[in-house]
Image (cartoon, rainbow, N blue to C red):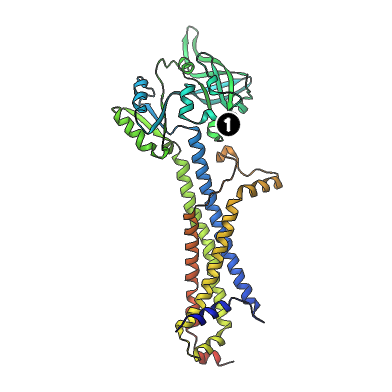
Amino acid sequence: MAWPYEWMLGTRYLRATQGRGFLSFISVVSVLGLAIGVAVLIVVLSVMNGFERELKTRILSVTSHATLMGLDGALKDWRADQAQALKMPEVLAAAPYIEAQALLMHGEHTAGTTVRGVQPEQERRAVGLAQHIEGGRIEDLADGGYRIILGDALATALAAHIGDDVVLIAPKGDATPAGIEPRMRRFHVAGIFHSGMYEFDRALALVNLHDAARVYQMGDRVSGLRLALRDPFMAPRLVRNLAVSLGGGYYVSDWTRNHANFFRSIEITKSMLFVILLLVVAVAAFNIVATLVMVVKDKRADIAILRTLGAGPRNVLAIFAIQGTFIGLAGTAAGAALGLTLAANLESLVHGLERLLGTHFLDAKVYFMSDLPAYAQWGDVLRICGVAFALCAVATLYPAWRAAGTQPAEALRHD
């Protein structure tokens, strides 16, 4: 048997006919329900993808790709280690640093923070934090100048501005005849940086490497080396190879390990949301069952006439399978188009809604960013559309099978 008449009847039953517009309305509702479910799933996963990509971009723009540290918290012969690291073709820069905890005071305001001692010219090559300084330059951190650059959130907590002086209190004290006195030093605020990552903006201050060494009595030692690599995603392997080439005895870390919890939580959340929201798509897809059952019941006389004219069960099954498939295809395609459109314009929509409601949805203190980025990956879109269409195809089987089993004599008994 040829397919044209099955195709014609399957598509014709989608259109409203006189006295039977309700069935067409139910078909439209099924398409809309499926489209909304697919669109919501695409938008949610796009937001998670955008959040992950934005987080990676911001992390890589303000932090080093890998770090090499001593097991006791300090590197003694760090210049030899730096020279060895720079011999590796994958390493772009290797900057020494000193990192320690401190308490900063400005007037009546105090805040705990991490103080990082850096060499300005090398730090600019190693990480991108130098490009985020406002009202100053990292080169202003001259040796002996005792100048400090604060994160903007930290400066706000201290009520400090460029040109003010802050007092740095080191956690270790000096022994004096009067007892243990805290180690204190006055620093001049030379600049403020804004990285977009609250983790850094609130809890990081930059000073000159030698000034930090004097305050924390490090001598000629440093806490470690910060490495900038050609390929940041090769950081775990490269930093381990470097430690092995130096003879071992080092503690190594990289940006993927330091922020592993962020990315692991994002992946877990994506998987959970996919499963949960897929239930919405499944409910919308199985609405097709109710739609086709109603169509089959309404078309019993038509089915009986087709059977008496020679149509077999397979032909009848194909007619209603085509109808259900069209509903699923239309809903999936409409949902994909709607979801991609919303994902592409989500930031503008959210900002407009925030202005309308006079509120702010994302707190940077919690989510590390104040925007809601969205990035639709074609792999996710294809997976969502494929699963949704497969559910629709499965949903058509029972009504189509029921239509194929219609007996002509039984259907025409009361007609």
Q: How far across and how far down the image is residue 271, in percent?
A: 47, 53
> Visible in this render: residue 111?
yes
Question: Looking at the figure, which quarter contains the C terminus?
Answer: bottom right
Q: How far across and how far down the image is residue 235, in percent?
A: 39, 36
Q: How far across and how far down the image is residue 224, in percent?
A: 40, 25
> Visible in this render: residue 117?
no
Q: Is residue 182 above or below residue 399?
A: above
Q: How far across and how far down the image is residue 247, in percent?
A: 28, 27
Question: Looking at the figure, which quarter contains the N terminus?
Answer: bottom left
Q: Nearer the viewer, residue 182 or 24?
A: 24
Q: Nearer the viewer, residue 86 or 352?
A: 86
Q: Give the crowd class for mark 1: few <14, some 14-19, many >=20 residues within 10 Å.
A: many
**Extreme-top residue of the structure:** 177
Mark 1 lies on a secondary structure that is loop
Left or right of residue 107: residue 219: left
Left or right of residue 205: residue 260: left
Q: Amino acid at mark 1?
A: His
Residue at 44% over, 15% down: 217
Left or right of residue 134: residue 220: left
Q: Which quadrant of the view contains residue 133?
A: top right
Residue corresponding to mark 1: 194
Q: Nearer the viewer, residue 204 or 330?
A: 330
Q: Is residue 217 above or below residue 341?
A: above
Count every numbered label the image shows and give the total.
1
